[in-house]
Image (cartoon, helix red, strand yellow):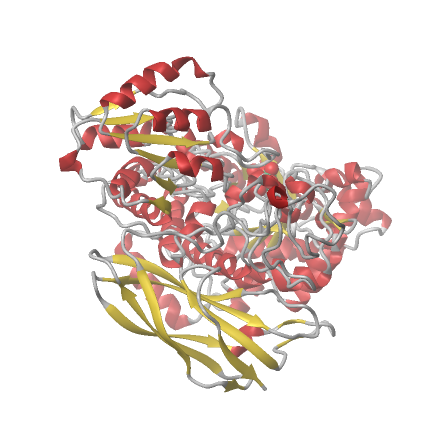
Amino acid sequence: MKYTRTLILAVLILLVTACSGQKSTTVGSDAELEKRIEKLLSRMTLSEKIGQMNQVSAGGEISNYAEALRNGQIGSILNEVDPVKINEFQRICMEESRLGIPLLVGRDVIHGFHTIFPIPLGLAATFDPALVEEGARIASLEATAQGVRWTFSPMLDIARDPRWGRIAEGSGEDTYLDARMAEAMVRGYQGTVLDTTSMAACIKHFVGYGAAEGGRDYNSTFLTERQLRNIYLPPFEAAVKAGAMTLMTSFNDNDGVPSTGNTFILKDVLRDEWSFDGLVVTDWNSMGEMIAHGFGVDRKDVASKAVNAGVDMDMMTFGFISHLEELVASGAVKESVIDEAVRHILRVKFLLGLFEHPYVDVAQGQAVQYDQSHLEAARRTAEESAILLKNDGVLPLKADDIRTILVTGPMANAPHDQLGTWSFDGEKSHTITPLQALRERFPGKVIYVPGLRYSRENRDRFDDVVAAARRADVVLAFLGEEAILSGEAHCLADLNLIGSQSELLAALKAAGKPVVATVMAGRPLTIERDLPNCRAMVYAFHPGTMGGPALANILFGDVNPSGKTPVTFLRTVGQAPLYYAHNMTGRPYNGETLLAAIETEAGQTSLGNTSYYLDYGAYPLFPFGYGLSYTTFSYSGISLGQTVYRPDDILEVSFTLSNMGEREGTEVVQVYVRDLVGSITRPVKELKAFERVRLDAGESRSLTVRIPVSDLAFYGLDGVKKVETGDFQLWVAGDSASGEPVSFKVQ
Ligand code: BGC
C-alpha cells in the first residue's frame, strides 16, 4: 500500500479534511504504523488473533453476533448496510471487547452504492478512467457514510467468453484496458489520501476466474504461468501498485490448484514479487469448496492449506475460527503464519482510521445518498458508455419532426433490471427508465406498448404493438436481458436476444416505421440477426439509475455517442472465445470458402486449410474497440519519432485526428502494437494506449501519444519479463480492426 505517511502530508490532510468535514485517518509514518500493529498484536491471545481472521455475513438480530463480537471472534462482517446496526456492532467491539478492535465492514459495492452507475463492462466501454474514478469515489462517499469501509471491487477478471455471466462485472477482454480501469477504481474507492470516506478496494478474483471452461461459472481453468503473467496478472499488479489494500481469491482451480490454496499466486507472486502487504480474503466459502474440488479432506484440512498458502481472512467457511487453534497446537500451522495474517488485517484497519473513527453519523449519512451531483455523474457515465453499433442516419432523432414516439420492449420501463447485476443497494424507486425520461421530455408524444413485458413473455401482445407502430413516427425498442440473466452463476449457452425479442423487432420493422433498437444487457449478445430489423442500434449494457435520461440524450442528439466495445461482439455463440489479441496461427484465415459455396463431394483440401469456421468464417460481428459517432473521424499523417528504439526509450507516435462531420464529437483513439517475431508467438495486436479526444465540427488536431518501450515487455521463453528486440508494427485507429500499420524496430 503506497500511502505516503509523512508529517507534511499529515498536515495537508488535516487542512483539507478540516474544511470538508471528512476526517483524516493519518496514522503517522510507516514506522509508527508498524509499531502500533506490533504493540496490539503482542497483546492478543491466539484466539483473538484467529477471531480477526474470521469474516461473517450479517443478517437478523444484533444479538446473534453480540457475544462473538464481545469475545473478539469476528474481524469483519459483510452484508450489513444499516448504519444504526453497524454503529452498534462497532460499539460492542470498541467498548465491550477486551482489546477494542473495530470491525471491518464489507459489501459488494460494485458499480455504485445507492446511485447505480453502469455495470463495470459498461464502465469499461467509456474508455474514460477519470470518469470511472469519479464514479468509484461517489460510491465510496455513499457507502462509507453508512459505515461500509470495504468494497469487494474491482473485479479484474479478463473475460473472453460472453457466455460467462460475470463478464458483466469486469472490464472485458483486454489486459491493458482492464489495468487502467483497475487503477481508476482503486484510486476512486480509496481516495488519493485516506480519510473517513475511503473504502478499501478488494481486487478480485485472484486469479484466472474469467477463463472458466466453456464460460460456465466456477469452472476449472488451465492457464499456463506465461498466460497468467502476460494476460491475467498485469491488471492485479497495476492495482497493487495503485495501492489496493485488499485482494480476494477466486473459486476456480487453475491446472488443478484451487486459488484459495495456491501458494504460487498468493505468496510467490503477490507477496514476494509485488510486495503486497494488504489483506487477502477468500471468496465466499471458497476455502470450504476446496473439499468439493477434492483438494482437501475436510474443513480442518482446507483451513490449514489456505492459511499456509497465504490467506488471511476466511469469508464464510468458518474453517479458521473452528480449526486454527488446534492446527497451531499440532504444529500444522505456525503461529508466525497467524501473526502475519493478523498484521495484514490490522494494517488495513489502522490505515482506514477505524480505531479513531469507528462510528458514522446516521443523519449525515442519509443526506449524502443520491446527491444530485452523484446522479449527474451517473448520467454522464451512462452517456459515455453507450455504444452506437449501427446508424443509417436515422439518429440522432429530430424531435421537431416527430409527433408520436412508440416506446416498446421489455427494457423500456424496467427500473430494477436496468440497474444490472450486483446492485444490492440500488433502489428501483430511484431509477429513471427510458420511458420515464422520454415521457418527461416529450409530454403527450409518447405512446407505450411494451409488446413483451419481460424478455421471455409469449407473443400474445404483438398485434397491439404493431398497430401502435403504424400510428407512430418512430419506434424506440428497448431490448436485451434482465439483470438476473447475467452475473454470478448466470451463464448462458445461447446469446441471441432471449425469448421472442428478435421476432418483436422484425414485426416492428414490418410495420414500416423507422425502428431504433437499444439493447441493455450484461454481456455482448449475438445481435447479428437483429441488425437488419432496425435502422440504428445503441448498446447500453445495463446503464444504471440514470440510464433513461442518458439514453434519451443519446437518441435525440444532445450527446454524441462515444462508447467503444470493451469486448469482441460475436456473430454466433459458437465462435466463443474470440478476441482481438489472439496469437497468430500458422495458417491465418485468408477469406476461403464458406459453407454456402461448398460443392457436393468436394475434395478434402478444396476449401483451403486455414483457421476459420466453414459456417461463420473467422471474424466477429464487431471488433474490440468499435463504436460509431454522429460524426466521423479520420486519422492521417501517422508517424513515429524514430524508426529504431532502445528498450528504455519512449516511443512517440504523432498523427492528425480530424472531425469530418458537422457536429462535435469524441473519439477514443487507440494505439495497438504487434511484436512480429518473438521467443514465443505474440498476439496479432495489443492495445498499448488510448485517449479520449473531443473535437469540434470540422476540427483537426495534431496529437502525440507516448508509450514507454518498456510497456512492450512480456514474459518470453526464458520466463523473464523483457522487451525482445526486433521488428514491430503499430496502428493508431478508432478500433482494433482498422488502420494501416507503421513499422519500427527495437534494438
Ligand atoms: C462472489 C464475490 C463476492 C462475494 C461476497 C461471492 O459469491 O464471488 O465476488 O464479493 O460473494 O458477496
Q: Residue at x 41, y 40 (%)?
A: 113
Residue 494 falls left or right of residue 255: left
**In front here: 220 or 465?**
465
Residue 115 location, x and y as percent? Answer: 35, 39
Image height of 514 relative to 194, above or below:
above
Q: Residue at x 61, y 45 (%)?
A: 597
Residue 243 location, x and y as percent? Answer: 50, 62
Residue 400 lies in what quarter of the image?
top left
Task: Residue at the far left: name it.
Answer: 400
Image height of 422 relative to 50, above or below:
above
**In front here: 518 or 415?**
518
Residue 323 falls left or right of residue 42: right
Residue 59 visible at all: yes
Q: Residue at x 47, y 49 (%)?
A: 622
Residue 18 falls left or right of residue 679: left
Residue 163 visible at all: no
